[in-house]
Amino acid sequence: MNRIYESMLEGIGGTPLIRLSSYSEESGCGIFAKLEFANPMGSIKDRIAKHMVEAAERDGRIKPGATIVDNSSGNTALGLAMVCALKGYKLKIVIRDTLSPEKIKFLKALGVELVYADTSLPPESPRSYNNLAPQVAAETPGGFYLDQHNNRENNAAHTLTTGPEIWRQMEGRIDVFIAGIGTGGTISGVARFLKEKDPRIKVVGIDPAGSIFYDYFHSKTLVRPSPYLMEGLGDEFLIGCVEFDLIDDILRIDDRTAFRMTKELARREAIFAGGSSGAALWGALEVAKRTGPGARIATIFADSANRYLSTIYSDAWLTEKGMI
């Protein structure tokens, strides 16, 4: 904070960690949240966008003037839009057709080419969300498929930055780390660093009802996914960045509970965050009940509410979706 940055890329990371006073007092535990919406493009995904592109540059896998292609629920796409603008790459992103209008407007304003995936298609369809991006990359001249869901540089970004920051800010006193599971990079990368520092730290993932991670973790069964409204969490396939061996437990949350906690967070702590943050808060409170008083619990608030003003923060939308 005491120097001039040469570009937006240097502003990534170093986000604040906040003690959630009302929830800490209510639960008898110390509950701390890392505010990742303080990154330049407003989410934790700025970290992986920069790291994955620069890793590909170092390895010679990406060429000058390339078109980077990936699928994203919006936040990684926004981070990549910043990185591509500064490094001279084009960007093409596969998104679900249920993405919030705010994210779509942000991406279009940044000149990102969008390809819409039909969420009504079954996971095995070649045009489904997870299967479409590699095809788009192959069909794009100079296309480079970044593959955030299976690219372990995603995890490495958090082992190198997010994990050490949490450890320092918590002064090494952490009992439980909680994070939503989207690509799996955040929870796995942070878990690797924290467990190397202190193997006693427990790591708990949060998975939305409708995703497959919860069932696979607890019973090694692959259930058929079902639709859900939360953005940025869960998946319909097993993906390469989720390192289940680093996770001690996974909790399941439904859309209604996540959205209720997200709005409550704004009222009680004046933290205006997205739906995955409400899910993470719920997870922290559930863990606090199980651990008992005195535990120190750290979590991630991944993005800002400004991406969800017409969805989570709209009573009309919530009513339409059966949440009210």
Image: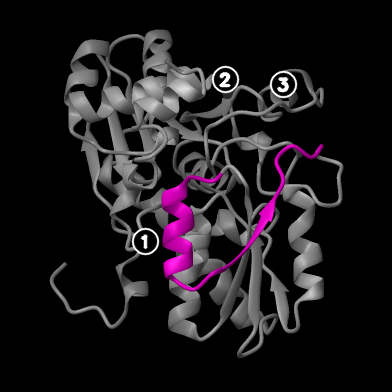
Specify the segment rendered in magenta.
99-122
- Secondary element under disc 2, as helix, strand or loop, is strand
- Mark closest to the chain's N terminus, 3 or 2: 3
Looking at the image, residue 143 lies above or below residue 251: below
Looking at the image, residue 13 lies above or below residue 267: below
- Secondary element under disc 1, as helix, strand or loop, is loop
Looking at the image, residue 232 lies above or below residue 58: above
Residue corresponding to mark 2: 252
Residue positioned 56% across, 49% down in the render: 73
- Foreground residue among 139 and 42: 139
Looking at the image, residue 171 lies above or below residue 12: above
Q: Amino acid at mark 1?
A: Met
- Mark closest to the chain's N terminus, 3 or 1: 1
Residue corresponding to mark 1: 41
Q: Amino acid at mark 2?
A: Arg
How many numbered dots are placed on residues in this image? 3
- Judged left or right of residue 95, residue 294 is left
In three-dimensional space, the C-alpha distance between marks 3 and 1, rounded to whole angstroms, equals: 33 Å
Q: Position of residue 82 (x, y in %)?
A: 43, 71
- Foreground residue among 186 and 117: 117
Tell me whether circle 3 and circle 1 mark residues in contact (CB < 8 Å).
no
Residue corresponding to mark 3: 215
